[in-house]
Amino acid sequence: MKPAVLLAATGLLLVIGLSGCTSEHSGDPVAGGGSGSGGSTTQDFIPSRSNPDPTDQIEGVLKVYYPSAEHVLDSQKVAYTYEPPIGGRHDSVWATCTGIVYPIAIRTENAVHSLEHGAVWVTYNPDDVDADQISELEQRVDGLNYMLMSPYPGLDQPISLQSWGHQLKVSDVDDPRIDQFITATRQNTQAGVYDENPTATGYPEPGATCAMVPGRFDPTDPPPFEPGPGTVPES
């Protein structure tokens, strides 16, 4: 039986060829809920021309420049540098990321493609996070476009958030940096995020969709997580 999953409205379903990615203009980034430490709110972490990457003000964020990457076959596993990965080669089909909460671990190569489209991927170690904590994380994801969430077995911290080229690992579901990170990175179309390429935006494909790809990725029965090291180079 297919696992239950919380599905958000996906809008227009795409019937496309996947040699390239399809665009869907999504507007400006939207701030998440919650408040930060020191009197800061998530509004202070909305990207702007004068502050293109607010994660620079969030302690503990890993940032690595990844240009847009090539696709791999659905039978291939990428040797990613970081776990969970934050960029590099990925499957030609993205994981549906319209506010989907996946109850099972999903294939990383699909999730990385979602990051390339500007999504934030919330992951957690199912051995370290209880049901109440999972529910709190779900409230940050469920129904919010350009968001997805799934367990990630073997994760070295209880919680890890990924966007393209960015990662934040935390131990507490109430850590204010979670909302700060989501606000700062989700759909960040500002240029000037990466010193290596000042013209690059926060992710490679502004305007790309997160909607379900009919016949290629079923969010109720997603490609499963594959443990162990990959063999295909990350870049």
Image (spheres, rainbow, N blue to C red):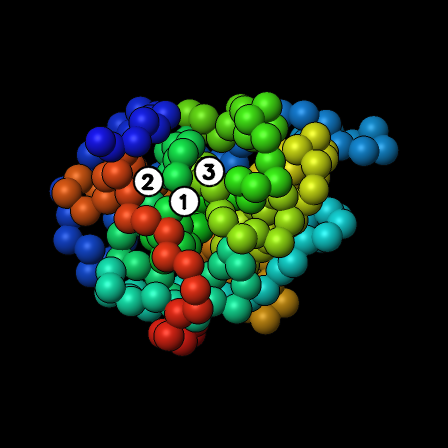
Q: Amino acid at mark 3?
A: Met
Q: CA distance from mark 2 to mark 3?
A: 10 Å
Helix, strand or loop under label 1: loop
Between residue 197 and residue 160, name the one nearer to us.
Answer: 160
Q: Which of labels 2 and 3 is toward the front? A: 3
Within 10 Å of the Cα at label 3, are there few (<14), some (14-19), or many (20+) other Cα atoms?
A: many
Residue drawn at x 20%, y 55% is: 18
Q: Is residue 201 left or right of residue 20?
A: right
Q: Look at mark 2 in the image and give the residue it sits on.
A: 96
Res. 214 image quadrant: top left
Q: Position of residue 171 (x, y in %)?
A: 70, 42
Does residue 79 appear in this view? yes
Q: CA distance from mark 2 to mark 1?
A: 14 Å
**Quarter occupied by the C terminus:** bottom left
**Quarter occupied by the N terminus:** top left
Q: Please tell me whether residue 200 is drawn above or below residue 3 in the rendered image.
A: below
Helix, strand or loop under label 3: strand
Residue 105 is labelled as 1
Between residue 85 and residue 228, name the one nearer to us.
Answer: 228
**Is tag 2's residue or tag 1's residue first in the polypeptide sequence?**
2
Residue drawn at x 44%, y 51% is: 115
Q: Which of labels 1 and 3 is toward the front? A: 1
Q: Look at mark 3 in the image and give the residue it sits on.
A: 149
Within 10 Å of the Cα at label 2, are there few (<14), some (14-19), or many (20+) other Cα atoms?
A: many
Q: Amino acid at mark 2?
A: Thr
Res. 119 image quadrant: top left
Q: Amino acid at mark 1?
A: Ala
Q: Position of residue 42 (x, y in %)?
A: 68, 32
Q: Position of residue 159 (x, y in %)?
A: 61, 43
**Marks 2,3: beta carbons within 8 A:** no
**Is tag 1's residue or tag 3's residue first in the polypeptide sequence?**
1
Q: CA distance from mark 1 to mark 3?
A: 9 Å
